[in-house]
């Protein structure tokens, strides 16, 4: 059955189509299968491109936003917290962009649609189950003739209206049975709204508003009239159904019509711009409006009281166009913008909750987008006029500052003279138009200092031309190229895109070889190759992941980069890409270096190199090593005062990789660890999860031979019977494994590591009788800290810590890497090479390959222990010290990033690390301790007691330690902290 059959109509008076035209519209047609090739996507927890729609349920409990970034996101309307991501299938270019979204009033379903043409010219509408964030069976409409531009539910959640860019209106029932169609539209539908009594108003920029009712024979059009103000964009019925507000695409005007006579009763006209988005407050007393209308360079959300006839009041504003409005039942309004961002505003103008983009904005950076001669160092601001950030690829670091030898993009300096290139669809060189696609907008320019060729960044492409304007190459990009630059060595084109990423393209052929994303927090970052090898900061692995389509009628899967850490975390590959000019050559060179480490033919060396080395022939190879997927079958939000809560879930995994375990953590603590007979091979499983007396976060993980799943989360909110804050959770025993080593063999000795350990132990033992009933320390200093004693200590900790206890590990000493694998170096004569044995970096590398596995303590062993603790787990580590070892270190040495990211992936361990990536920890006899330990002790003594309760919370301690260490070291050392998202106290103030 083709699409023309689906739009067949029978005009009988006002009747458009009866429900009996096609009873199986949604399930009778198959759609083309989307590509199964994995797609690398940036993931910040917020939208990357314009938010197109915002919607809520009738209770205002949930908010859903949809975006051109090809995702929709579910939020808690009360806190603004991100709950989950809805991922429909996606394709290349704009295929997958979501233009329309609507949550059913009962909150059970979310309808999504946009551009979903996977090859046959037709489009899809997906009905997501809100609780599981998945598309359930028989929940997809196929065969729609154009991209979807609007969706609207009836108040009883039983009818769904679909507006198309071309081809008109479709209406379906909740079970996706077809109701009717009106194809007589000449332009796109952007507005649709049901009244309380079931009437449907639809606005199209063809100039008309149409009104429908659902009769015995299906969809009936009862009225069609020319909108009085121009091109209608948005419509909204008042709650009593007596008036209809119409907003316009082409003017800052709103008309309020009487729905009986369809005559205007009031007009709002603010001049230029537009007020295309309109919504009535829940009580009908206020009309909200917004759009492209500006005041003072901002885009306001306006409220018109007295049933829309009063003077306007600005409730809040955005820096870009307001794309959508939805009223909440408590009188508030939620607004979404193209920034991208969204917010809830109260009637007194308070921004109650909000979400902003977590990306850099490279628009108008001008000379703030700078590149070093070999393109290995970048300097850029996160916003025009903002503080410059310096990214050094070889040092694996992001910090505030500028590179002295980095240059800004060269613009006009004689020939070629490129004119009309900025924000234009008609750039020219030498008076001749450059060939662009229709509607393509030029955004940025850089001219080569060597051959006068130039690069143009546009809305859709990076293009390179000869000095005369002849095209050399064109490369499609994921977002507008707001900034471009050329390296002085002529080998690289570097572009800053609208999704916050920076991309390196080979000047020769335009092939992308590297990409960087730096988070707006200016701390986390990740850099990756097209195949997926990556380097990252601590906490940065979640910023990029793999999107995998399943079927056209199923939600997609997503795996963050960290799920493939053992195989794809390859800083050594990343650091060779620019010098080799090719990702595959960089991999081959890095593999040759690893092979050189195994020349010592010992079993120890073989053991060190035994971790899987993944050779990716293409990104499709990712599909052969997927961890499991956990799908939640319970509500992701629960309000209860019970001591336990049931959690229902289902696990999917590859047939050759059965699930080996499922863990449940509550506020980071391990409460259930299912293995063997406790696991079901398939189907829905339910577990009872114990709860603390306060609010809680439950996280579920599954594991197979390829790794751990992405977590699914259930938020538990305790019903508040009183406004008194919940008492801090207290623990029975505090188990302490504290290791400090200064007396390494010369010349590797340290000054203060052993003292740091003793001083830290002293202050933590004082916790007995306060937050903890008792403290049980195990202190290993210098010669006592042998490899065997440390391993025994880790085993003791794992066996001892119970559900009501806490385990703290503190390591101070030396740490080293072999490849991406971290090791802590214990005390004893055999922990280092014999005197005179090491004469070069190559000698040190060979010694490590031969001896490290048997002489040192692996980061994997530390992470395994901390993940196994049933109570609270905290790790303090200070092992990247300056000295002889640092001078002998190779580029990848003393970098704990991989181990710290492994510790954080289950959100079960609170981590305090002395420094970031490859920075060195500093100690000074005048301080009495190393900078990190000195700051820790000061914080526990009360400097981190921010709210003066006598309790030290992780976030407070982190903030104090970070600021204090930077102060002591003049910014040269930056501590890192990883949390479990719950800020329960970990210590009491001591003296």
Image: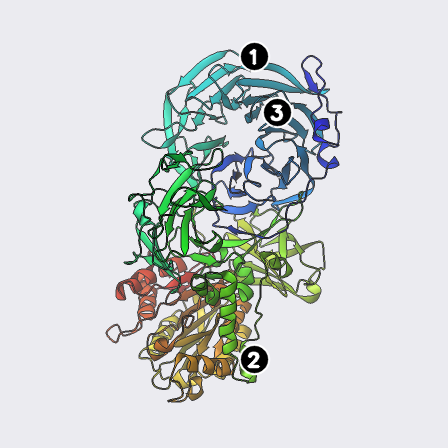
> Quadrant of the image for the C terminus?
bottom left
Side of 161 where 423 appears, left or right: left
Quarter of the image where one finds residue 886? bottom left
Mark 1 = which residue?
Answer: 260
Q: Position of residue 350 (x, y in %)?
A: 38, 35
Tell me whether the residue at label 1 lies in contact with that at label 2, contact meaning CB atoms closer than 8 angstroms.
no
User: In terms of depth relative to the viewer, which is nearer, 728 or 528?
Assistant: 528
| Marks 3 & 1, CB-CB < 8 Å contact | no
In the image, residue 233 above or below residue 946: above
Q: Nearer the viewer, mark 1 or mark 2?
A: 2
Please state the horizontal and vertical placement of residue 790, each as a whole percent of the image. 48, 80
Give percent across and percent down for residue 439.
47, 33
In this view, the mark in front (3 or 1): 3
Residue in the foreground of this view, choosing between 324 and 720: 324
Which is more N-terminal, label 2 or label 1? 1
Q: From mark 1 to mark 2, how far is it between C-alphas? A: 84 Å
Would you say 86 lies left or right of 726 here? right
Q: Is residue 877 visible?
A: yes
Report which quarter residue 738 is drawn in: bottom left
Q: Secondary structure at mark 1?
A: loop
Mark toward the start of the polypeptide (3 vs 1) = 3
Residue at mark 3:
168
Q: Which residue is mark 2?
A: 606
Q: Circle 2 sits in a helix, a strand or a loop, which is it? A: helix
Residue at 75 percent across and 35 percent down: it is 28
Residue 473, how many percent across, how many down? 47, 47
Corner quadrant of residue 621: bottom right
């Amino acid at each position: 059955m083709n699409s023309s059959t689906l739009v067949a109509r029978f005009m009988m008076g006002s009747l458009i189509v009866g429900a009996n035209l096609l009873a199986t519209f949604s399930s009778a047609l198959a759609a083309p299968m989307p590509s199964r090739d994995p797609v690398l996507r940036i993931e910040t927890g917020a939208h990357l491109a314009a938010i197109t729609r915002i919607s809520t349920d009738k209770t205002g409990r949930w908010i859903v936003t949809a975006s051109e970034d090809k995702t929709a996101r579910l939020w808690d309307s009360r806190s603004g917290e991100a709950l989950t991501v809805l991922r429909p299938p996606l394709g290349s270019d704009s295929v997958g962009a979501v233009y329309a979204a609507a949550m059913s009033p009962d909150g059970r379903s979310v309808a999504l649609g946009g551009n979903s043409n996977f090859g046959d010219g037709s489009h899809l509408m997906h009905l997501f189950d809100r609780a599981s964030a998945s598309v359930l069976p028989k929940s997809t409409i196929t065969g729609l003739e154009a991209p979807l531009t609007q969706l609207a539910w009836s108040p009883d959640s039983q009818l769904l209206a679909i507006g198309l860019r071309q081809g008109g209106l479709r209406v379906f029932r909740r079970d996706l049975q077809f109701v009717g169609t009106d194809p007589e539209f000449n332009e796109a539908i952007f507005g649709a709204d049901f009244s309380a009594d079931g009437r449907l108003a639809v606005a199209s920029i063809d100039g008309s508003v149409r009104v429908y009712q659902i009769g015995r024979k299906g969809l009936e059009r009862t009225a069609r009239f020319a909108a009085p103000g121009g091109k209608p964009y948005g419509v909204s019925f008042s709650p009593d159904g007596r008036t209809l507000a119409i907003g316009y695409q082409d003017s800052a005007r709103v008309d309020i019509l009487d729905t009986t006579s369809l005559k205007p009763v009031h007009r709002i006209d603010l001049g230029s711009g537009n007020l295309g988005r309109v919504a009535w407050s829940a009580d009908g007393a206020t009309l909200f409006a917004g759009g492209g209308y500006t005041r003072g360079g901002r885009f306001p959300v306006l409220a018109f009281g007295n049933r829309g006839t009063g003077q306007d009041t600005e409730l809040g504003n955005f820096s870009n166009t307001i794309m959508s409005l939805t009223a909440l039942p408590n009188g508030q309004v939620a607004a979404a913008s193209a920034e991208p961002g969204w917010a809830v505003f109260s009637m007194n103008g308070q921004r109650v909750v909000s979400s902003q983009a977590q990306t850099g904005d490279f628009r108008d950076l001008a000379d703030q987008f700078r590149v070093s001669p070999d393109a290995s160092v970048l300097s850029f601001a996160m916003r025009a006029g903002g503080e410059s950030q310096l990214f050094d690829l070889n040092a694996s670091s992001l910090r505030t500052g500028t590179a002295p030898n980095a240059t800004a993009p060269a613009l006009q300096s004689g020939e070629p003279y490129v004119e009309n290139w900025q924000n234009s669809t008609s750039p020219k060189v030498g008076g001749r138009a450059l060939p662009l696609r229709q509607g393509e907008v030029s955004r940025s320019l850089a001219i080569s200092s060597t051959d006068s060729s130039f690069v143009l960044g546009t809305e859709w492409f990076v293009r390179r031309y000869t000095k005369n304007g002849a095209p050399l190459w064109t490369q499609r990009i994921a977002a507008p190229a707001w900034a471009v630059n050329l390296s002085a060595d002529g080998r690289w084109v570097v572009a800053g895109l609208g999704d916050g990423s920076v991309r390196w393209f080979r000047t020769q052929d335009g092939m992308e070889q590297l990409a960087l994303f730096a988070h707006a927090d200016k701390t986390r970052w990740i850099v990756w190759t097209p195949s997926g090898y990556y380097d990252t900061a601590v906490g940065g692995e979640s910023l990029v992941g793999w999107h995998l389509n399943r079927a056209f009628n199923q939600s997609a899967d997503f795996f963050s980069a960290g799920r493939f850490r053992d195989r794809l975390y390859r800083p050594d590959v990343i650091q060779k890409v620019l010098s080799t000019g090719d990702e595959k050559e960089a991999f081959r060179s890095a593999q040759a270096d690893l092979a050189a480490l195994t020349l010592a033919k010992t079993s120890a060396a073989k053991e060190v190199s035994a971790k899987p080395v993944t050779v990716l022939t293409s990104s499709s190879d990712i599909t052969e090593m997927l961890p499991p997927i956990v799908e939640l079958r319970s509500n992701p939000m629960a309000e209860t005062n019970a001591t336990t809560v049931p959690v229902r879930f289902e696990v999917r995994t590859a047939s050759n990789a059965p699930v080996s375990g499922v863990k449940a953590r509550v506020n980071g603590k391990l409460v259930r660890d299912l293995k063997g007979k406790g696991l079901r091979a398939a189907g829905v499983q339910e577990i009872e999860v114990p709860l603390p007396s306060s609010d809680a976060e439950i996280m579920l993980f599954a594991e197979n031979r390829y790794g751990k799943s992405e977590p699914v989360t259930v938020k538990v909110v305790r019903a508040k019977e009183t406004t008194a804050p919940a008492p801090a959770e207290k623990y029975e025993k505090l188990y302490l494994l504290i290791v400090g080593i200064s007396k390494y063999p010369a010349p590797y000795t340290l000054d203060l590591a052993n003292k740091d350990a003793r001083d830290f132990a002293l202050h933590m033992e004082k916790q007995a009788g306060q937050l903890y009933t008792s403290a049980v320390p195990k202190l290993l200093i210098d010669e006592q800290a042998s490899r065997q004693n440390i391993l025994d200590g880790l085993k003791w900790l794992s066996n001892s810590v119970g559900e009501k206890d806490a385990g703290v590990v503190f390591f101070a000493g030396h740490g080293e890497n072999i490849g991406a694998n971290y090791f802590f170096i214990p005390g004893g004569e055999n922990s280092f090479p014999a005197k005179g044995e090491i004469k070069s970096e190559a000698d040190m590398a060979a010694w490590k390959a031969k001896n490290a596995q048997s002489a040192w303590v692996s980061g994997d062993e530390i992470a395994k222990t901390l993940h196994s603790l049933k109570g609270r787990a905290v790790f303090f580590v200070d092992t990247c010290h300056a000295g002889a070892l640092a001078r002998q270190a190779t580029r990848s040495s003393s970098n704990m990033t991989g181990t710290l990211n492994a510790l954080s992936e289950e959100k079960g361990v609170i981590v305090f690390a002395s420094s970031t990536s490859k920075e060195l920890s500093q100690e000074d006899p005048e301080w009495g301790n190393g900078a990190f330990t000195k700051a820790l002790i000061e914080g526990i003594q009360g400097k981190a007691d921010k709210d003066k309760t006598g309790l030290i919370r992780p976030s407070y301690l982190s903030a104090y330690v970070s600021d204090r260490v930077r102060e002591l070291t003049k910014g040269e050392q930056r501590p890192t902290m990883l949390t479990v998202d719950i800020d329960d106290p970990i210590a009491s103030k001591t003296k």
